[in-house]
Image (cartoon, rainbow, N blue to C red):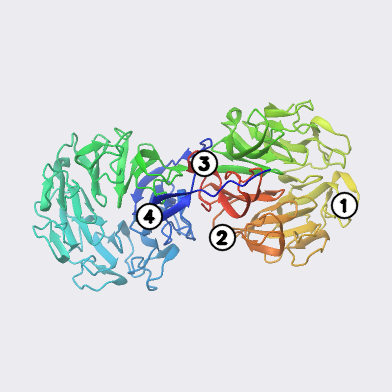
Amino acid sequence: MFSPTASRLCLVAPWVWFAAQASAQDVLVPLAGATTVASGFGHSCALKADGAVMCWGRNADGQLGTGDYWSTATPVPVRGLPGAASAIATGKTHSCAIVSGAVWCWGANLSGELGSGIGTGDTAVPVAVSGLPPGATAIAAGDTFTCAVVAGAAWCWGDNTLGSLGDGSGVGGPAPVAVSGLGAGVTQISAGVFHACAIAGGAAKCWGNNGSGQVGNGVTGGFEPTPVQVVGLAAGVVSISASAIHSCAVAAGGVVKCWGSNGNGQLGTDAVSSSNVPVDATGLTAPARTVVTGALHTCVVGTDDTSRCWGSNLYSQLGDGEGPDSNVAIVSPGLAGNAQNVSSHGYHTCVLRTGGGVWCWGFNAYGQAGDGSREWRTQPVAVAVTDVGALAAGAAHTCAVVGGGVSCWGFNGEGAVGTGRASLSVPLPFAIPQLSIGATAVAAGYDHSCAVVNGGVWCWGNNEKGQLGDGTNNNADEPVAVKGLASGVTRIEAGGNRSCAVQNGDVLCWGYNANGELANGTTVDTNSPLPAVGLDGTIDSLSLGPNHGCAVVNGAAKCWGLNDSGQLGNGAGSGFTATPIPVQGLASGVTAISAGYSHSCAIVGGAAKCWGYDGYGQLGNGILNDTQLTPSAVTGLDAGVTAIAAGDDATCAVHDGSVLCWGGDYEGDLGNGGTPRTMRLVPTWVIGLANRAGGLVAINGTHACATTTGGGLSCWGDDLLGPLGIGRQVIVGTPGTVVLDDRIFGNGVD
């Protein structure tokens, strides 16, 4: 008798709960190609060389810019920026970017910090800052205000209670205002919690809250409504950073100067007392190039490309383990000689490494370290993405291509997971060691799996009907090479007890063939690949159900095999055909096709059409038991469909960036949290995957999976044998994030 895995919760901080993470093999891929990194309080962002912006961590206020409010422990792309970004900034709960000289912001907007001119409502997608002159070159985000440099002048907007905007008015709001006295010569700007600093003509200027002397003008207390000169820094300043209660700058010669509160050693001096004027940070063995201030700590990158930090280490934000606070600079482990830039705003720190990688450490309850976990990181870890490149769902197991390797999970009684030893279930992803590099496609049948690796095909699992294609009928618990398919293969599909591949443009199939499922004109099984007939031309799409198959050839749909429910779409509802026949009404414009158990679906001009059996509403036309012998329109999906998958009794599609499912919801298959043993006759959103679809969707048996933005993977439905990859939860009616190692596999519902 099976028993569900008990729900496990871990308390990381008094206000943060998250699903516990189980152990499996790690296949995360380091984020690459970054040129800038920015750290907010509970989130982080990176700017890539192509201008794309990726963010990760806390998203309760929409600060990740994904169009939703789901937090994620791995990077996801910001949606809706009008072009390539040239600069980014992260505040406490909002983010900003510069695109073609215009500033765009997203996230929290309590005080108008987004500058949108539409009040104070939060937004999960970027909005343009209204009223700011064009030509912005630098951007800074504070807790509840934002600043930018435009044509050498400083502008700010948002909260102005303590003079954060620097215009002397004390009046805040979403409209950008010019910072007094900084109309020219500004090269850098930094926004803290309630104060800001800038470099103008080489001089350091600060304004706003001065309760701890963080403005640096020799006064402690009150606030400065307009910029004041920082004592001793009238020239030669090359980098500046404002935090909560202290500030720092890099002066001429790479000397680091800090001022404000020193309760945790964040000024970097031998003394423990605070200072309202700049003091030298000691113990640096190389001149500094850039400096950043976190909430209670400070970090620099030196001319030797080494990251060093000092101050509070309460959350391991110094990166040297769980040691005490330090007023002496500590070299960040693994970041000596390869650090390019450093960023911090709260209690975690991130560094841009030579070559475009990003490493983070410290407080990580929201996933802001970006390595897929929510565990505090006491030393630097690589920000990683899961990079799901292909996805396949078998009857009770699942496989995916991740980072060039193949991982499978779920029912393994016939060896379909590829572990080398048959077992009832592998409830968490297993990275198949023989297929760790060069995988481009994956397929899953009833109890077998196949993959394309470096152009060749490998299969494993049940082989009773010859579906492994190795010339035998012997089961295989680990991958075996398919005969004659060592190179030139671009596509692989599996359905029921058979498989098909596209090699050099030709379709070849093997395995079970009682109803002409191999499309070769016969009904004889074969344990080695044979050419299909009637599929000459460019294969745009190929799909296999248990007893029939379909393909798109030069834009036209064709199907073959069993036709007892009209699943071939030729106007008949009986018999079978051993050679492909045209689907009525789909002679052109078809971009994708999917064969389910006894129905089929296709995408035509962006619209979804389905045909065949409808006993569970899987055709999606709003009518139950409305079997269609030719393609019929799916309600509400007449445009914007990019992927479709037909399962046993249900269908799923990706529509306008969201995942929707319909049909039988007997084991949570539809992912909408509905009552089991029910049906949905029209497409219904999968909970948590609105505006988060990554482009791939697969459904088989009574479970489904879909990729999410940023390369993550979520699954839902019947998990009795572990096909969801979340550790055996029996029935999961909403998407669960596939777990890998001590990390979350991407960014689904966790």
Residue, far right: 575
Residue denoted by label 4: 14
- Which dot, 3 or 2, sits closer to the camera? 3
- Which dot, 4 or 2, sits closer to the camera? 4
Q: Mark 2: which secondary structure?
A: loop
- Which dot, 3 or 1, sits closer to the camera? 3
3 or 4: tag closer to the N-terminus: 4
Q: Are marks 4 and 2 in contact (CB under 8 Å)?
A: no
Identified at 34% across, 50% down, the residue is 38
Say the numbered circle drawn on residue 690. Answer: 2
Residue, far front: 1
Q: Are marks 3 and 1 in contact (CB under 8 Å)?
A: no
Q: Amino acid at mark 4?
A: Pro
Choose between 101 and 276: the one closer to the eye: 276
Circle 1 residues within 10 Å: few <14, some 14–19, many ≥20: some
Q: Mark 4: which secondary structure?
A: loop
User: Is 738 situated left or right of 73 in this image?
Assistant: right
User: Is 72 situated left or right of 548 in this image?
Assistant: left
Residue denoted by label 1: 564
User: Is 13 situated left or right of 155 in this image?
Assistant: right
1 or 2: tag closer to the N-terminus: 1
3 or 1: tag closer to the N-terminus: 3
3 or 2: tag closer to the N-terminus: 3
Say the numbered circle drawn on residue 22. Answer: 3
Q: CA distance from mark 3 to mark 4?
A: 22 Å
**Is 526 situated above or below 34?**
above
Q: CA distance from mark 3 to mark 2?
A: 26 Å
